[in-house]
Amino acid sequence: MLDMRTPGPGDNLPRGTICIEDIEIGMKRHLRKQVTDRDIELFAEVSTDRNPVHLDDDYAQDTIFEGRIAHGMLTAGLISAVIGEQLPGHGTVYLGQSLKFMAPVRPGDMVLAEVEVTEIDHAKRKVTMLTRCEVDGKNVLKGEAVVLAPSRKFD
């Protein structure tokens, strides 16, 4: 069964969107991104979180992290990217997300962000997914997301 939505005439769902009718338990999607100094600086600017543990090498060296780390929510944002761009994709609405930060992400780290479908409520168009991020095979973030998936049916 194809799991990628192909829009038909009069249908405004973008190519690549996976509709609730096509989502299955166990489906996974992921992305990989290297976290850069620029990412951290831009996140600090946008979020207004200028905690020196993210921006100041000297300050961060004297913390429990012994060096600068990325914002936890920057890492969590990669989960949002997988959900909003891949599974289910465009048109998805976030309903909730739990997060547990397990280890720091540092500038230069390559993060693997992955989601996996664990529950589907077709009647409500709700999809529950395990979410996780890892660096070098080690979990740095885990949680659960609940989203409202797009549908081909227009009520």
Image (cartoon, helix red, strand yellow):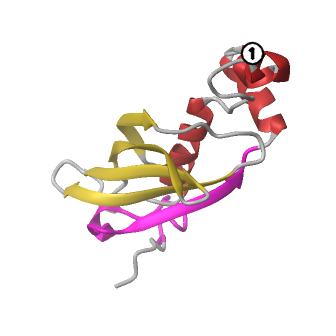
Residue ID at (45%, 59%): 87
Q: Is residue 148 left or right of residue 136?
A: left
Asked which quadrant contains residue 63, the reply is top right
The correct choice, above or below, for 135 with respect to 69 in the image is below
Q: Secondary structure at mark 1?
A: helix
Residue ID at (26%, 67%): 25
The correct choice, above or below, for 148 with respect to 8 in the image is above
Percent position (x, y) of residue 74? 62, 35
Residue ID at (43%, 48%): 92
Farthest-out residue, bottom:
1
Range drawn in magenta: 7-35
The quarter of the picture where the N terminus appears is: bottom left
The amino acid sitting under disc 1 is: Pro
Percent position (x, y) of residue 91? 46, 49
Q: Main secondary structure of the magenta part?
A: loop
Asked which quadrant contains residue 143, the reply is top left
